[in-house]
Image (cartoon, rainbow, N blue to C red):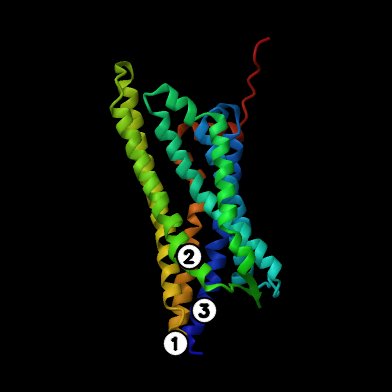
Amino acid sequence: MSDIATNLILSTRWLNIIIGIPLFIFGIIGNILTIWIFTRPRFRHTSSVRYLIACSVANFIQLAQTLLPRILTEGFKIPLIKSNSDYCKARGYIAGVATLCSLSFPCWASFDHFISTSRNATTRKYWTSKQFVYCAIFATILFWLIVQLPIVIFTRANGESCITTNIIHTYIQSYGITPLVYSILPMTAVICFNIGIVKNLRRSRVISFTNMNTRLARQVRRMLIPQLIILVLSGIPFSIHSIYSLATISMKKSLIQNAIESVILHTVRLLFYLNYVCSFYIYYIMSSEIRRGFKNLIRPSNTVSPE
Protein backbone atom coordinates (compact mmCIF):
# COMPACT_ATOMS: atom_id res chain seq x y z
CA MET A 1 0.00 0.00 0.00
CA SER A 2 1.37 3.42 -0.97
CA ASP A 3 2.22 6.06 1.60
CA ILE A 4 -0.51 8.32 0.23
CA ALA A 5 -3.20 5.66 0.69
CA THR A 6 -1.88 4.83 4.17
CA ASN A 7 -1.97 8.48 5.24
CA LEU A 8 -5.49 8.91 3.84
CA ILE A 9 -6.74 5.88 5.75
CA LEU A 10 -5.04 7.16 8.90
CA SER A 11 -6.74 10.53 8.42
CA THR A 12 -10.16 8.84 8.58
CA ARG A 13 -9.31 7.61 12.08
CA TRP A 14 -8.41 11.12 13.19
CA LEU A 15 -11.53 12.55 11.58
CA ASN A 16 -13.68 10.26 13.71
CA ILE A 17 -11.73 11.15 16.84
CA ILE A 18 -11.13 14.90 16.43
CA ILE A 19 -14.52 15.75 14.91
CA GLY A 20 -16.63 12.84 16.12
CA ILE A 21 -15.98 13.29 19.85
CA PRO A 22 -16.96 17.01 19.98
CA LEU A 23 -20.04 16.26 17.85
CA PHE A 24 -21.04 13.49 20.24
CA ILE A 25 -20.49 15.57 23.39
CA PHE A 26 -22.25 18.70 22.11
CA GLY A 27 -25.04 16.60 20.59
CA ILE A 28 -25.77 14.67 23.78
CA ILE A 29 -25.65 17.83 25.92
CA GLY A 30 -27.77 19.81 23.43
CA ASN A 31 -30.49 17.17 23.17
CA ILE A 32 -30.66 16.70 26.95
CA LEU A 33 -31.00 20.47 27.40
CA THR A 34 -33.70 20.62 24.71
CA ILE A 35 -35.72 17.91 26.44
CA TRP A 36 -35.22 19.51 29.85
CA ILE A 37 -36.18 23.02 28.77
CA PHE A 38 -39.12 22.01 26.57
CA THR A 39 -40.66 19.94 29.38
CA ARG A 40 -40.80 23.00 31.65
CA PRO A 41 -44.28 24.48 32.34
CA ARG A 42 -43.57 27.51 30.13
CA PHE A 43 -43.36 25.34 26.99
CA ARG A 44 -45.53 22.40 28.00
CA HIS A 45 -48.72 23.65 26.34
CA THR A 46 -47.14 24.52 22.99
CA SER A 47 -48.10 21.76 20.57
CA SER A 48 -45.06 21.97 18.26
CA VAL A 49 -42.73 21.57 21.24
CA ARG A 50 -43.92 17.98 21.64
CA TYR A 51 -42.57 17.17 18.17
CA LEU A 52 -39.25 18.78 19.05
CA ILE A 53 -39.03 16.77 22.28
CA ALA A 54 -39.65 13.57 20.31
CA CYS A 55 -37.02 14.70 17.80
CA SER A 56 -34.46 15.27 20.56
CA VAL A 57 -35.12 11.79 21.97
CA ALA A 58 -34.58 10.31 18.49
CA ASN A 59 -31.40 12.40 18.08
CA PHE A 60 -30.09 11.14 21.42
CA ILE A 61 -30.71 7.51 20.41
CA GLN A 62 -29.13 8.07 17.01
CA LEU A 63 -25.96 9.57 18.47
CA ALA A 64 -25.64 6.75 21.01
CA GLN A 65 -26.37 4.01 18.46
CA THR A 66 -24.23 5.16 15.53
CA LEU A 67 -21.82 8.00 16.28
CA LEU A 68 -20.43 6.58 19.54
CA PRO A 69 -19.80 3.08 18.08
CA ARG A 70 -18.26 4.70 15.01
CA ILE A 71 -15.86 6.71 17.17
CA LEU A 72 -14.89 3.56 19.08
CA THR A 73 -14.53 1.21 16.09
CA GLU A 74 -13.30 3.50 13.31
CA GLY A 75 -11.48 6.01 15.49
CA PHE A 76 -9.95 3.98 18.32
CA LYS A 77 -10.19 0.58 16.53
CA ILE A 78 -12.04 -1.03 19.43
CA PRO A 79 -13.94 -4.09 18.11
CA LEU A 80 -17.65 -4.10 18.94
CA ILE A 81 -19.37 -6.27 16.33
CA LYS A 82 -17.14 -9.36 16.61
CA SER A 83 -19.15 -11.15 13.88
CA ASN A 84 -22.32 -10.82 15.99
CA SER A 85 -25.23 -10.62 13.54
CA ASP A 86 -27.75 -9.97 16.32
CA TYR A 87 -25.81 -6.86 17.31
CA CYS A 88 -25.82 -5.69 13.68
CA LYS A 89 -29.56 -6.25 13.36
CA ALA A 90 -30.42 -4.45 16.61
CA ARG A 91 -28.07 -1.54 16.02
CA GLY A 92 -29.08 -1.09 12.39
CA TYR A 93 -32.80 -1.32 13.13
CA ILE A 94 -32.81 1.07 16.10
CA ALA A 95 -30.51 3.55 14.35
CA GLY A 96 -32.53 3.40 11.12
CA VAL A 97 -35.84 4.07 12.86
CA ALA A 98 -34.32 6.81 15.04
CA THR A 99 -32.81 8.50 11.98
CA LEU A 100 -36.05 8.59 10.03
CA CYS A 101 -38.04 9.73 13.06
CA SER A 102 -35.51 12.47 13.72
CA LEU A 103 -35.94 13.75 10.16
CA SER A 104 -39.74 13.44 10.29
CA PHE A 105 -40.53 15.26 13.53
CA PRO A 106 -39.17 18.68 12.43
CA CYS A 107 -41.45 18.38 9.39
CA TRP A 108 -44.40 17.81 11.73
CA ALA A 109 -43.28 20.81 13.80
CA SER A 110 -43.20 22.97 10.66
CA PHE A 111 -46.68 21.70 9.77
CA ASP A 112 -47.87 22.56 13.28
CA HIS A 113 -46.49 26.11 13.00
CA PHE A 114 -48.20 26.49 9.62
CA ILE A 115 -51.57 25.31 10.97
CA SER A 116 -51.27 27.47 14.08
CA THR A 117 -51.20 30.61 11.90
CA SER A 118 -54.43 29.68 10.12
CA ARG A 119 -57.37 32.07 10.57
CA ASN A 120 -59.73 29.10 10.89
CA ALA A 121 -60.15 28.39 14.61
CA THR A 122 -61.59 24.90 14.03
CA THR A 123 -58.60 23.95 11.88
CA ARG A 124 -56.16 25.23 14.48
CA LYS A 125 -57.92 23.44 17.33
CA TYR A 126 -58.01 20.02 15.64
CA TRP A 127 -54.60 19.85 13.98
CA THR A 128 -52.70 21.30 16.95
CA SER A 129 -54.58 19.37 19.66
CA LYS A 130 -52.65 17.21 22.09
CA GLN A 131 -54.45 14.09 20.84
CA PHE A 132 -53.49 14.70 17.21
CA VAL A 133 -49.86 15.46 18.10
CA TYR A 134 -49.48 12.26 20.09
CA CYS A 135 -51.19 10.25 17.33
CA ALA A 136 -48.87 11.79 14.73
CA ILE A 137 -45.79 10.93 16.82
CA PHE A 138 -46.96 7.37 17.45
CA ALA A 139 -47.97 6.83 13.80
CA THR A 140 -44.60 8.15 12.59
CA ILE A 141 -42.68 5.79 14.86
CA LEU A 142 -44.88 2.83 13.91
CA PHE A 143 -44.57 3.60 10.18
CA TRP A 144 -40.78 3.68 10.25
CA LEU A 145 -40.66 0.57 12.46
CA ILE A 146 -42.52 -1.27 9.70
CA VAL A 147 -40.52 0.26 6.82
CA GLN A 148 -37.19 -0.65 8.45
CA LEU A 149 -38.10 -4.27 9.23
CA PRO A 150 -36.00 -5.57 6.27
CA ILE A 151 -32.92 -4.48 8.22
CA VAL A 152 -33.69 -7.14 10.82
CA ILE A 153 -34.28 -9.76 8.12
CA PHE A 154 -31.40 -9.10 5.72
CA THR A 155 -28.57 -7.72 7.89
CA ARG A 156 -25.71 -9.90 9.10
CA ALA A 157 -22.22 -9.42 10.47
CA ASN A 158 -19.08 -9.83 8.40
CA GLY A 159 -16.14 -9.44 10.74
CA GLU A 160 -16.34 -5.88 12.06
CA SER A 161 -18.81 -4.79 9.37
CA CYS A 162 -22.56 -5.06 9.04
CA ILE A 163 -23.76 -5.95 5.54
CA THR A 164 -27.10 -6.60 3.86
CA THR A 165 -27.74 -9.85 2.00
CA ASN A 166 -30.57 -8.57 -0.20
CA ILE A 167 -29.67 -6.39 -3.18
CA ILE A 168 -33.27 -5.24 -3.69
CA HIS A 169 -33.39 -3.83 -0.16
CA THR A 170 -30.06 -2.10 -0.79
CA TYR A 171 -31.38 -0.46 -3.97
CA ILE A 172 -34.59 0.67 -2.26
CA GLN A 173 -32.62 2.10 0.66
CA SER A 174 -29.96 3.88 -1.42
CA TYR A 175 -32.02 5.04 -4.41
CA GLY A 176 -35.35 5.56 -2.67
CA ILE A 177 -35.52 6.07 1.08
CA THR A 178 -32.19 7.84 1.56
CA PRO A 179 -32.53 10.68 -1.01
CA LEU A 180 -36.27 11.01 -0.47
CA VAL A 181 -36.41 11.10 3.32
CA TYR A 182 -32.95 12.39 4.13
CA SER A 183 -33.05 15.45 1.88
CA ILE A 184 -36.00 15.95 -0.51
CA LEU A 185 -38.97 15.60 1.85
CA PRO A 186 -37.53 17.49 4.86
CA MET A 187 -36.32 20.39 2.76
CA THR A 188 -39.58 20.56 0.78
CA ALA A 189 -41.63 20.47 3.99
CA VAL A 190 -39.62 23.18 5.70
CA ILE A 191 -39.72 25.47 2.65
CA CYS A 192 -43.43 24.97 1.90
CA PHE A 193 -44.66 25.24 5.48
CA ASN A 194 -42.52 28.26 6.31
CA ILE A 195 -43.63 30.05 3.15
CA GLY A 196 -47.20 29.18 4.15
CA ILE A 197 -46.62 30.65 7.61
CA VAL A 198 -45.35 33.90 6.15
CA LYS A 199 -48.34 34.11 3.79
CA ASN A 200 -50.79 33.39 6.62
CA LEU A 201 -49.26 36.11 8.75
CA ARG A 202 -49.33 38.63 5.94
CA ARG A 203 -52.98 37.84 5.19
CA SER A 204 -54.05 38.39 8.78
CA ARG A 205 -56.87 40.93 9.01
CA VAL A 206 -56.38 41.71 12.68
CA ILE A 207 -55.07 45.27 12.48
CA SER A 208 -54.00 45.46 16.12
CA PHE A 209 -51.49 42.64 15.51
CA THR A 210 -49.90 44.09 12.38
CA ASN A 211 -46.58 44.85 14.07
CA MET A 212 -46.55 41.46 15.77
CA ASN A 213 -47.23 39.71 12.49
CA THR A 214 -44.41 41.61 10.79
CA ARG A 215 -42.04 40.56 13.56
CA LEU A 216 -43.20 36.94 13.43
CA ALA A 217 -42.88 36.82 9.64
CA ARG A 218 -39.34 38.14 9.93
CA GLN A 219 -38.56 35.56 12.61
CA VAL A 220 -39.89 32.72 10.45
CA ARG A 221 -37.72 33.83 7.53
CA ARG A 222 -34.74 34.06 9.87
CA MET A 223 -35.42 30.56 11.21
CA LEU A 224 -35.71 29.18 7.69
CA ILE A 225 -32.10 30.04 6.84
CA PRO A 226 -30.30 27.86 9.45
CA GLN A 227 -32.80 25.03 8.96
CA LEU A 228 -32.07 24.93 5.24
CA ILE A 229 -28.32 25.19 5.80
CA ILE A 230 -28.35 22.22 8.16
CA LEU A 231 -30.51 20.21 5.75
CA VAL A 232 -28.22 20.98 2.82
CA LEU A 233 -25.04 20.25 4.76
CA SER A 234 -26.29 17.02 6.27
CA GLY A 235 -28.87 15.41 3.99
CA ILE A 236 -27.97 16.16 0.39
CA PRO A 237 -24.27 15.15 0.44
CA PHE A 238 -25.17 11.99 2.32
CA SER A 239 -27.83 11.10 -0.26
CA ILE A 240 -25.51 11.77 -3.20
CA HIS A 241 -22.74 9.67 -1.69
CA SER A 242 -25.16 6.83 -0.95
CA ILE A 243 -26.27 6.76 -4.60
CA TYR A 244 -22.67 7.01 -5.86
CA SER A 245 -21.44 4.18 -3.61
CA LEU A 246 -24.08 1.76 -4.86
CA ALA A 247 -23.69 2.81 -8.49
CA THR A 248 -19.92 2.17 -8.40
CA ILE A 249 -19.91 -0.87 -6.13
CA SER A 250 -18.85 -3.23 -8.95
CA MET A 251 -16.11 -0.98 -10.34
CA LYS A 252 -12.45 -1.85 -9.87
CA LYS A 253 -10.72 0.91 -7.92
CA SER A 254 -7.13 1.55 -6.98
CA LEU A 255 -5.95 1.68 -3.38
CA ILE A 256 -5.64 5.47 -3.56
CA GLN A 257 -9.14 5.85 -4.99
CA ASN A 258 -10.57 3.64 -2.25
CA ALA A 259 -8.71 5.65 0.36
CA ILE A 260 -9.97 8.96 -1.07
CA GLU A 261 -13.53 7.66 -1.14
CA SER A 262 -13.13 6.48 2.45
CA VAL A 263 -12.14 10.00 3.53
CA ILE A 264 -15.12 11.44 1.65
CA LEU A 265 -17.45 8.85 3.21
CA HIS A 266 -16.36 9.64 6.76
CA THR A 267 -16.55 13.39 6.10
CA VAL A 268 -20.08 13.10 4.69
CA ARG A 269 -21.16 10.95 7.61
CA LEU A 270 -19.82 13.43 10.15
CA LEU A 271 -21.52 16.30 8.33
CA PHE A 272 -24.76 14.34 8.49
CA TYR A 273 -24.50 14.20 12.28
CA LEU A 274 -24.92 17.98 12.33
CA ASN A 275 -28.59 17.17 11.83
CA TYR A 276 -28.65 15.59 15.30
CA VAL A 277 -26.31 18.02 17.03
CA CYS A 278 -27.21 21.58 16.07
CA SER A 279 -30.91 21.84 16.97
CA PHE A 280 -30.53 23.12 20.53
CA TYR A 281 -27.88 25.66 19.54
CA ILE A 282 -30.08 27.00 16.73
CA TYR A 283 -33.00 27.29 19.17
CA TYR A 284 -30.75 29.08 21.66
CA ILE A 285 -29.50 31.59 19.10
CA MET A 286 -32.87 32.28 17.51
CA SER A 287 -35.21 32.20 20.53
CA SER A 288 -35.15 34.52 23.52
CA GLU A 289 -37.48 32.09 25.33
CA ILE A 290 -34.95 29.26 25.01
CA ARG A 291 -32.20 31.56 26.27
CA ARG A 292 -34.37 32.54 29.22
CA GLY A 293 -35.16 28.89 29.93
CA PHE A 294 -31.47 27.98 29.78
CA LYS A 295 -30.53 30.83 32.12
CA ASN A 296 -33.23 29.71 34.55
CA LEU A 297 -31.77 26.20 34.38
CA ILE A 298 -28.28 27.47 35.14
CA ARG A 299 -29.38 30.09 37.71
CA PRO A 300 -32.72 29.04 39.22
CA SER A 301 -34.85 31.87 40.52
CA ASN A 302 -34.93 32.15 44.29
CA THR A 303 -38.00 34.32 44.28
CA VAL A 304 -40.52 33.25 46.95
CA SER A 305 -44.15 33.76 45.98
CA PRO A 306 -46.29 35.57 48.58
CA GLU A 307 -48.71 33.49 50.59
Q: Amino acid at mark 3?
A: Ile
Relative image position of residue 127 (x, y in whole percent): 47, 31
* Residue 172, numbered label: 2
Q: Residue at x 45, y 73 (%)?
A: 245
Residue 133 position (above or below residue 278):
above
Dot placed on the residue nearer the N-terminal end, 1 or 2: 2
Question: Dot 2 surroundings within 10 Å: few (below 14), some, or many (20 or more)?
Answer: few
- Whether residue 149 appears in this view of the structure is yes
Question: Dot 3 surroundings within 10 Å: few (below 14), some, or many (20 or more)?
Answer: some
Dot placed on the residue nearer the N-terminal end, 3 or 2: 3
**Is residue 234 toward the left or the right of residue 44 in the image?**
left
Q: Which mark lies nearer to you, 1 or 2?
A: 2
Indicate the quadrant containing the C terminus: top left, top right, bottom left or bottom right.
Answer: top right
Relative image position of residue 58 (x, y in whole percent): 58, 49
Query: 233 and 54: which one is in front?
Result: 54
Tell me the residue that label 3 is attached to. 9
* Residue 33, picture quadrant: top right
Query: 305 and 225: which one is in front?
Result: 225
Query: 163 and 34: which one is in front?
Result: 163
Residue 26 position (above or below residue 74):
above
Tell me the residue that label 1 is attached to. 254
